[in-house]
Amino acid sequence: MTVSPFDHPILSGLLGDGEVAAHFSTEAEIAAFIRFESALAEAEAAEGVIPAEAGQAIAQALGAFRPDVARLRAETARDGVVVPELVRQMRVAVGEPHGRYVHFGATSQDVIDTGLVLRLVPVLDIFADRLDALVDMLTDLDDRQGQLSVMAHTRMQAAIPVTASRKIASWRDPLVRHRSRLTAIRDQVAVLHFGGAAGTLEKLDDKGSDVAEEASVWLGLRTLPRARHSERDGFAELASFLSLLTGSLGKIGQDIALMAQNEVGEIRLASGGGSSAMPHKVNPVGAEVLVSLARFNATLLAGMHQALVHENERSGSAWTLEWMLLPQMAVATGAALRNAAALLSAISFVAVSRT
């Protein structure tokens, strides 16, 4: 058993998303850290900050580097961050005389924030593909069944008949808007975080911006005029987007659950969950999960907004809070997109005459 339902051996089948979660695994995190340190060494060698031989030796050694994870765990309990011990192990792996150039001019936050970005970018690409697929599914549903008459409900009471197309539009159009938002969010996320001890790159003298530009090319990220170590609005904006997206998916789930009620009967589920006591039931499990995940992300969003309060040039507590919250929000969003696709493929509208 695990504490998190997202990687629980049983509940993960309902609430998890293996494709998204893989980007938050220990292996993915360490691989991203190694990419940062390799790119930094290559960039500093190219700009003459460290010897060219050192850049080559670091890149070669880190390509085969596998850290002692148990040791990382023990030292992180003391340091509050994994990077000091990770860099120590990297320097040993590179060996003399070049090991001392590993991590030159960087700080722990550069490694961790950029490492997170390197994993978030492919996650956002997964979300983009799934959003596109959902919009296509809803468009197809509209083409097939949009002209059927269903009952509109206001304040949980029957209002007037409308076409199913009206219902579908209220599900699809927010997803189209979220797809546009995602493009802008991805651009804000895909940045290099590199500022050194206090965000000034003081150890690199006048080479700081050149090294940053060179490293960003290696990593496929864009540079910033200065590091945003304590400016967390970008990550908070991402969290807000995740909550908005799962909220819109939750609205779809809530509507479908209500319309699939036996006494309403305006949506038929091709498949659903069974009951241990009532074998005749087809429970709207997928719809219910969308509501749960929407409320989960809305709850965690408050914590990400709390993490905006980074004191001075770096916070330990607010930064740690982000590590606890953002990966769960990302996996919840992946699970919501996955469940929404399965749910939409299993529904059909049923025209119901009202007198």
Image (spheres, rainbow, N blue to C red):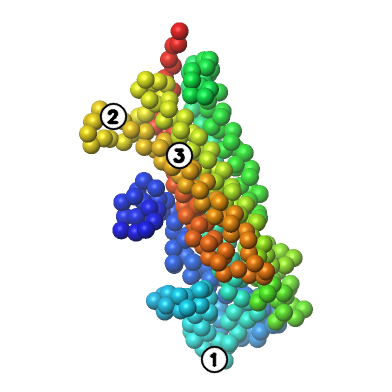
N-terminal of the pair, mark 3 or mark 2, is: 2
Image point (62%, 52%), residue name: 237
In the rendered image, which residue does mark 2 sit on?
Answer: 281
Q: Which mark is residue 129?
A: none
Give coordinates of residue 170: x percent, y percent: 56, 29
Disc 3, SS: helix
Q: Position of residue 104 (x, y in %)?
A: 63, 81
Give the Cα distance between marks 3 and 2: 20 Å
Helix, strand, or loop for circle 1? loop
* Quarter the C terminus occupies: top left
Label for residue 96? 1
In this rendering, the answer to whether 304 lies above or below 335 is below
Q: Inspect this view and state whether residue 214 appears.
A: no
Q: Residue furthest bottom?
A: 97
Q: Residues within 10 Å of mark 1 (few under 14, many from 20)?
A: few
Tally of numbered discs: 3
The amino acid type found where label 3 is placed reads Val
Residue under pointer 3 = 291
